[in-house]
Amino acid sequence: MRPSQVVPKIVVALAVLFAILYVAVIAQQSPVTGGGGWRTTTFGSAINDPGSFLRVLLDSITFAGALFIVASGFALIFGLMRVVNMAHGSFYLLGGYIAYEIQQTMTGQGFSIPSSEVNTWDWLVPLLVAVPCIAVVGLVTQQAFLRWNQGQELRQALITIAISVIIADQIIAHFPRSVSTGAQRLGGNAVDLTWPGWTDRLVDLHVWGVYYSLARLVMLAIGLAIGIGLWLWLYRTKTGMVIRAGVDDQKMTAALGINIQRTFAISFVVGSALAGLGSVVWASQGNIASGQDAQWLLNSLVVVIVGGMGSIFGAAAGAILYAFVLDFSGSYLPTAGADCCTQYSPIFTFILIALVLAFRPRGLFGRDG
Amino acid sequence: MNGYWSHQIFLQTFLFGIAAASLIFLSAYGGMVSLAQTALFGIAGVIIGNLATKGGAGGTSKGLHLGWDPTVALVVAVVMTTVIGLIFGAVAARSAGIYFLMITLTFSVIATYTLGQVTNISGFSGIGGISSYTPGWIGDVLAHPDRLYYVALAVAAAVYVLIRYIVRTPFGLSLQGVRDDPVRMASLGYHVPLHRTLAFGFAAFIASLGGILYVWWSGQISPGNVDLPETINLLIMAVIGGLFRIEGAWLGAFVFIVIQNYVRDFSVPGLGFGGTLFGGSFNTIVGIIFLVIVLASPGGLMGAWDRIVAEIARRRGLMRTADESAAGAGN
């Protein structure tokens, strides 16, 4: 390799190594009196404060679980049909609000329900209603708008953008509906989905004195289950085999006499359903509000750009890397000075994308074609 | 001219048209649809807001408030935005087509979050009062908006002429070659990613001009000016006008601004609610118009116009040959 190829790689490797060492040993906790230098962070290094490190690590892994659910749907649609579904974020938002309405109707509490009032059924039924709703929305979108212009990628992207604009505006006009008296109805304002009551406790991990939220661990478990389910579907069933073949070579697959249109419809439906599922899971952890459609479209895009499109391993790898960068830059950037440095965490997402694209323009696990 | 039309409708048409022209330049001549133009537009506004306004850091509006001379601030803002555009371009240049669209969209949303979170330079509420710090040759925008109007008109005309000129230079021609067949251009020895990066930098330069005019006109810049809905609005302007013709930039901006101004209070029964902060069902209406245009005429209004003109020319040609053959047969 020529020096001009080796030098950037060495520089990047050194920078990444420095970042890892910073988190591991170099960082220091802020002194009691305040102030501090470039080494001062909120938690201190991993050696000094392993509990906080473990907590941030678990936060990022559990967030990666939710990211994976949503982004794998996006990657599936993009990988097979080469459709950038810009409405993926709107599907996410719609799923969350539908689930909220169902949960409100079932428990009748209004606005924020304490988790003790929510049993597993009160959480599952909204999930089981919202996800098929979004699947139907996805099916209608695909059949009406995306079936007849395959291959025109730009046009399809523009169409899905138009649909996302319309859906997002309609959500603002019609949701949330079931709120307690006095709270603001409609307008897409923020509302909470609530986990079942039994998840609302901290689990003793028996390591470094860390207690961690069971709800987040459940979220991770759901993400893992989805990952395993997707892998089984794509690698052990006939439909999955057709999808993988279509990802590799669409025209050849169709030429072999396989009903590629049916496969497209199925994958779009599954991809949209995953957006709805991810929404219910993450909205239970946080909330659902207008504006999150942009956020989750960005999340899906970053995961697919970093991980590469068309493979679940890519989606998983992209989700983990992105979650790590987000959570660790949010927690371990220096805090010296009034507003310093954790506020720059979005820039690290950009750096992640730039680095991945510089060395692998198709993403880590992306394939040419 | 009626003040409302010139100061509201046409001024916005000029400055958003400039931003849309940067998008259409890239799509028509570079084959790249960039969704980062709004971000660059806003970044230029934020930079000049930070540099030109006075008052020291913090205060009622965030920002550095360095109090530089406005003309110097203008030059620095344009240069810095162009450099940022070159960096964005360098990251995205090796990806084509739909991947490029995705990557530029992530730039746009990341820029929104950066502007929202980094309170040193902007923060959630952004920077205000910028229209008090315009260069002397523009003067007080609130007292005499006419000067800004004429400056915007001149800049828009200059941008149009500049783009038409650039696409005929060797750089412009090789850029169009990169658009049409990057593999062949690479085999001929052209550095394809470099061409794309430079084109992106040029588009950033143009977008920065629009952004600076914008903050002089509106007086403020905040993350809400560069978020996803605003990015999509700029794309809608470009698509309505026509993604493949530069004239479409100002045509699309004009149509969009007119709709925005006159539909805001309009409420379609059953679809939304009118007269509120969210502008009623304006977004739904504009989304539907956008959808219809993409479905019916991907070249936008200019594309439809071109098709009509070509059809008329074709029919005239047919009639002419019919006349000639009739005349010839009569001889």
Image (spheres, rainbow, N blue to C red):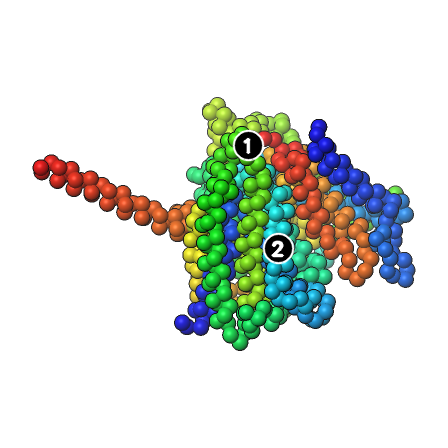
> In the rendering, which numbered label is found on residue B79?
2
Horizontal arrangement in the rendering, residue A202 relative to residue B303 (left or right): right
> Residue drawn 52% across and 31% down?
B188
Q: Residue A98: where, in percent of width, then height? A: 58, 52
- Callout 2 environment at 10 Å: few (<14), some (14 to 19), or many (20+)? some
Does A320 sit above or below residue B75?
A: above
Q: Is residue B162 visible?
A: yes
Looking at marks 2 and 1 on the same chain, the residue that comes earlier in the sequence is marked by 2
Which is nearer the eye, B151 or B8? B151
Q: Residue A37: where, in percent of width, then height? A: 85, 55
Provide the secondary structure element on which disc 2 rests: helix
Q: Which residue, as the protein is rendered here, is positioned at the far left?
A: B331
Q: Quadrant of residue B140?
A: bottom right
Check the residue under mark 1 and report the chain it is in.
B
Check the residue under mark 2 and report the chain it is in.
B
Q: Which residue is mark 1?
A: B189
Which is nearer the eye, A337 or B166? B166
> Residue drawn 70% across and 34% down?
A4
Q: Residue A97: where, in percent of width, then height? A: 60, 54
Q: In the rendered structure, which amino acid carries the disc numbered 2? A: Val
Quarter placement of the C terminus of chain A: top right
Q: Which residue, as the protein is rendered here, is positioned at the far bottom?
A: B143
Q: Estimate the spatial distance between the alpha carbons at disc 2 and disc 1, rounded to whole Å.
A: 30 Å
